[in-house]
Amino acid sequence: MLQIFYESQDFFLLKELEKLGPRKGVITQSVKDVVQSLVDDDLVSKDKIGTSVYFWSLPSCAGNQLRNVYRKLESDVQSSERRLVELADQCNALKKGREESDEREEALSNLKKVEEKYNELKDEMAEYADNDPAAFEAMMAHAAANRWTDNIFTLRQWCSNNFPEAKEQLEHMYQEVGITDDLDYLEMPTVGN
């Protein structure tokens, strides 16, 4: 299709292109889609004049487009090269003060020993977590709270079954003593490290 535009260097209506397309091997039914694709890719220009839509593409337009793409790519390359230089300078600046020395090696060695000791102590704490009196007490309190919650649910069910006519009075009493609809069992808290 693009050859039709370049060879004639003329303006066309869509109907004219639909007649010329099959000569270049484009099926008549797909001419409109092909032309629209060329317009979308900025290879063909289109303009509406009155009620007609004209399409055109000149070889010089394609050359200009290629030059613009080339300029943009050149600009991108230059900005990438500047960014590379900036990053190299930043890397060199970060290396200052981190030169290999006996003092630095000793400090890194001490840091590694402290981290290893910390990890050992953390693992040891995890081993004793099951025997922690505070954790055991929290587990017992958790179980007791859920047992009382279960007792409250059981009592509410029993009252509802045995005194269906006093439902409003029972609900009012529950509200007064702080038993709300969002009452639920407690989740077991996780032990933090």
Image (cartoon, rainbow, N blue to C red):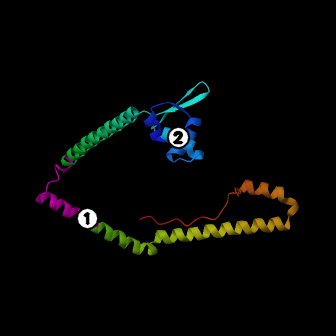
Residue identifier under label 2:
35
Magenta-tinted stretch:
93-115
Percent x, y of residue 117 = 28, 68
Residue found 56% across the figure and 48% down from its top: 27
Percent x, y of residue 193 = 41, 65
Image quadrant where residue 114 sits: bottom left
Residue found 50% across the figure and 30% down from its top: 11
* Mark 1 element type: helix
- In this view, 85 is above or below 13: below
* Mark 2 element type: helix
Nearer to us in this view, 89 or 100: 89
How far is the residue under mark 1 from the one under mark 2? 70 Å
Percent x, y of residue 125 = 38, 71
Say left or right for 72 vs 52. Answer: left
- In this view, 190 is above or below 67: below
Task: Give the residue type at disc 1.
Answer: Val
Residue identifier under label 1:
114
> For the stretch drawn in magenta, what is the main secondary structure?
helix
Residue found 48% across the figure and 30% down from its top: 10
Q: Residues within 10 Å of mark 1 (few under 14, many from 20)?
A: few
Task: Give the residue type at disc 2.
Answer: Val
- In this view, 142 is above or below 24: below
Comes first in the chain, label 1 or label 2? 2
Nearer to us in this view, 147 or 121: 121
Q: Is label 1 or label 2 in front? A: 2
